[in-house]
Image (tube, helix red, strand yellow):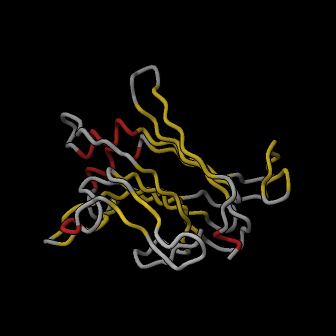
Amino acid sequence: SQKTDMQNVGVHLSIDGSGNLWFVIKGDRAAVNGDTYIDVELLQGSLSMTGVGGATGGFTTDAPDTSGGRFPGDMRFDVRFRTGGTLPIIFISRWENVAGTYQYVNVDSATNPALFNAIKTGVYIQGNADSTPVCYDAFGKNVYDPNAFVEAAINFTQIISAFAGGGNQECLAFRTVFIRTKSSHAETASLED
């Protein structure tokens, strides 16, 4: 569907004057009719597409099957485009073992208020509320319709420190950035683009 069609996406890493590592993600969508998500995963392992060349396929990874095909500590950022001019939302999740089953665990105020409060000041997100001219192709135009573009800046140093309980930061070596769209935040939502 057009609401999940992406044309321009990107990630950027930079270090601020205080030594904090910032992770910036951005993306667009062709149509603004309905909610949609850009899902950005930071994986410690490699990821390869199978079934290339028109064949139905999937993905393979070098992460062990015993941890669900990902490495513990992999992270996911779901950026939600919303209809109607309200601010976009970001969901932050981490791959963890929960009662013997690996899954992405969302950081939210209900399930982990201390962690949520520790990272919320290091996350900024904004969509374009008005028509926004651009100097590149945006679905055959040089302007974005309102709510067609979103970007988020995440203080990665602050988030990793919060996950480590405010102590020493974990050493995570991310090798793969996997960007895709989906029609909902649900784990079972189909991948679109």
Quadrant that contains the C terminus: bottom right
Residue found 79% across the figure and 46% down from its top: 136
Q: Nearer the viewer, residue 65 or 122?
A: 65
151 over 66 or under it: above or below: above
Q: In terms of image quadrants, where is residue 64? A: bottom left
Residue found 62% across the figure and 54% down from its top: 27
Which residue in the rendered view is the most extreme toward the left? 100
Residue 85 shown left or right of residue 16 in the figure: right
107 over 160 or under it: above or below: below
Which residue in the rendered view is the most extreme toward the top? 17
Q: Nearer the viewer, residue 116 or 19?
A: 19
Which residue in the rendered view is the most extreme toward the right? 141
Q: In terms of image quadrants, where is residue 88? A: bottom right
Which residue in the rendered view is the most extreme toward the front? 53
Looking at the picture, how far across and down is residue 149, in whole percent? 68, 54
Looking at the picture, how far across and down is residue 141, in whole percent? 85, 55
Please state the total of marks drawn on the protein image. 0
Q: In terms of image quadrants, where is residue 162? A: top left
Residue found 23% across the figure and 61% down from its top: 96
Residue 136 shown left or right of residue 193 in the figure: right
Looking at the picture, how far across and down is residue 94, in whole percent? 31, 57
Looking at the picture, how far across and down is residue 98, in whole percent? 18, 68
Quadrant that contains the N terminus: bottom right
Residue found 60% across the figure and 57% down from its top: 87
167 over 136 or under it: above or below: above
